Amino acid sequence: MEEKEMKRALKERASGEPEKYYPVGVLQEEGFVRKRCRVCGQHFWTRDPEREVCGEPECSGGYQFIGKEDNATEKMDFIEVWKRFSEMFDRMGYTPIKRYPTIARWNPTTEFTLASITDFQPYVVTGEVKPPANPLVVPQTCLRFNDVDNVGITGRHFTGFVMIGQHAFTPKDEYRQEDYFRDIYRWLTEGMGVKPEEIIFHEDAWAGGGNFGPSMEFFSRGLEIGNQVYMMYRREGEELKELNIKVLDMGMGQERPAWFTLGTETAYEAVFPPVVRKLKEITGLEGRSEVFSQFLPFSGLLNVDEIEDEEGMWRRVAGRMGVDVKLLKEEVAPRAAMYSVADHTRALLFALVDGGLPSNTGGGYNLRMIYRRAMDFIEAYGWDLDLGDVVQWHAEYLKPQYPEMLEGIDEVLEILEHERKKYYQMKEKTRRIIERLKGRRLTEEEMVELYDSHGITPQALLSSGVIERVPPDFFKRVAERHEGRGVSRVKTQKEVLYNLEGISPTEILYYDDYSLIEFKGRIVWMEGEVVALDRTAFYPTSGGQMHDKGWMDDVEVVEVFKQGSVVLHRLRGRLKKGVGEVVDCRIDWDRREQLAQHHTSTHIINGVARERFGNHIWQAGAEKTTEKARLDITHYESLSREDLEALERRANEVVEEAIPVESMLLPRDVAERRFGFRLYQGGAVPGEVLRVVKIGELDVEACGGTHLKNTSEAEIIKITGTKKIQDGVVRIEFVAGRRARELAQEEERVLSEVMGALGVGEVGETPSSAERLFKTWKRLRKLKGSAGALFR
Ligand SMILES: [Zn+2]
Ligand SMILES: [Zn+2]
């Protein structure tokens, strides 16, 4: 069964027994009666005995709150909403917590934070990890790109938004559905001051990530304000199994109460008032447009997700309004563009301040897409507008709620400046490609492909006449192509090779002390030359670090790997002992030491790169062998020689400072609280307990590798090379410890050979001598070219 069908089945079951699934007691106490919508058949609750339709705008005649003064007794803009909501819920016993990052590094199922519940997936929801507070409320910044074509035009869509979450995670018997419902009802009636007779609750069901539950959506005057989900089930095959803990998941866009209580023309005026005000001034769209105002109640009909023929819909809307379709578009399009610029810049601010980076792949792709969409509008209308300025206005407005936005603004502006250069390079390239396409008609598929592989936007194609129209869902289609296409941040499970049923997890000895190289272990499983012990200090290949080698009772250990939580050793030959017997183990120290030097140096370089370049530096990949190490970092441009020298110098300072390398095992919630989400440099990691490796104030990561005890043991770090491996990812190659010394000796030897060949006596003369030689060679080659025939 599809998730959708299971959700429908749950909704039917719940509406068959509302007392069991919904907070019916409170509803009745407050004077609500249960009804069924005359139009759509939905069950809903209302205090108005005359009411026959549910709260959906389609059933109740569209938005009725726009331009009204009496929607609610309390009036609040965006910033005011969280202030009042958090104060009220604080008084009711909820703990307001800080938002999580917009980039969901802790969560293996999604790249961006999509909803407030994303914060607590997957481990808090299952009960494996404790929530940071309970119950709690959170103003969570979120990104969603599937509605990007609707932004601006419907007056209510956003790519970046804030979902206010009301959450509780409780054992079955402590679950208080009626109280949670009463609390949100108090917010609606007292916090916002909505008249009870104008609130409508819908009986619904919710499904997401394999979890299910009944839910109550709440509406007023045609606007959905939020949805309270009572998550109680998890899917098991075709059945719904009750969860160990019940989860309250109320989500309300912070945008909604602002828009509703103020009754502004579009949500944007209520959500970022100063930004819209300034944009209107600069774009000259200050005056009220009669046509646009008339259009807004119909704008919902243009939701490109739900319509096939966009042109036809424009004509029909124009017909119903009694205006010319050309005039309608002329009045609506620039306003939609202006609102899009306002939304996209805020979404970029949310992402970039949290370490996101526009690029050609994965989630970075969507960031680049909205940046370019905003730039295209500015170019098309010739507005004198700098996106950096708009981002700055947002940060200033958001300061009371998110001071970190303004604090991180310099780095955000720097990233945008690089993005601006790339945008204009792309435009130039586009111009050349379009030259070649003149006279052809492109299919929609080809348009998507051109955008995808060359970054050529449909606006550019349109203005050059290569296409006649832009598919209304163009950007949605592009975004879909890229969803989940990024580098997988979840470590792939090694293929299951052996039957290890009944074998307990191996006790790991290498976490505490990397210099422990001699130990005894009892054989718990054996198949030919592959052996599992009850405990081991042998490091299995994982986290980009190569495995150890060594000996088990004088038989060589050639490979070490993990299957599930059991460490397996592959030997060269068979042991003379069997299961139950104890073996003497010894690890090849030279190899172990070299790997630890390389691994700890990887953390050092990551730390110094973040010091130098900023918060957008994340580990995108790493590899540690005995020969060399490499670290891939997220960065918007190639590293210069100056960058490399500075990184190497600083890394060696860290070595000289002899900073202790601490490692500790911590419950996940404790580790996150203490160190933040920086921990997840290698991507999301499973488990309730994290092993944390910390180098002073420089770097802290969740990491299972073998590490030095002190940075001084790395001896020396030498960066050997760099290259851009993809847009937004730069590789740094380096060596440390013994390998670095060897390399230095090798270079010295090569240099003295070169000096000998050039006949120079001092190192300092070598470059100028080599240059002279090179120039001579070039002159000769030219000569050879002009007199080619003579030489052949
Ligand atoms: Zn209805
Ligand atoms: Zn590591």
Image: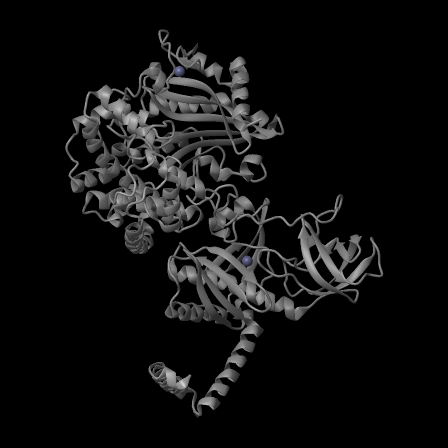
- Res 160 seen here: no
**Camera-side residue of 140 and 317:** 317
Q: Is residue 81 above or below residue 53?
A: below
Q: How many marks?
A: 0
Relative to 251, 441 lies left or right:
left
Quadrant where the N terminus is found in the figure: top right
Residue 660 in the image: state x and y as whole percent.
Answer: 53, 64
Residue 423 in the image: state x and y as whole percent.
Answer: 30, 52
Relative to 335, 142 lies left or right:
right
Write down which quadrant ligand 2 falls in: bottom right
Based on the displayed image, in which of its 4 quarters is residue 82 positioned?
Answer: top left
Relative to 758, 426 lies left or right:
left
**Camera-side residue of 790 and 259:** 790
Residue 14 in the image: state x and y as whole percent.
Answer: 53, 17
Quadrant where the C terminus is found in the figure: bottom left
Residue 664 in the image: state x and y as whole percent.
Answer: 58, 54
**Camera-side residue of 164 and 743:** 743
Based on the displayed image, in which of its 4 quarters is residue 737 positioned?
Answer: bottom right
Residue at image position (50%, 47%) is 672
Q: Is residue 492 above or below residue 556?
A: above
Based on the displayed image, in which of its 4 quarters is residue 262 positioned?
Answer: top left
Relative to 35, 744 lies left or right:
right
The furthest residue to the top: 50
> Colour mode?
one colour
- Res 209 seen here: yes
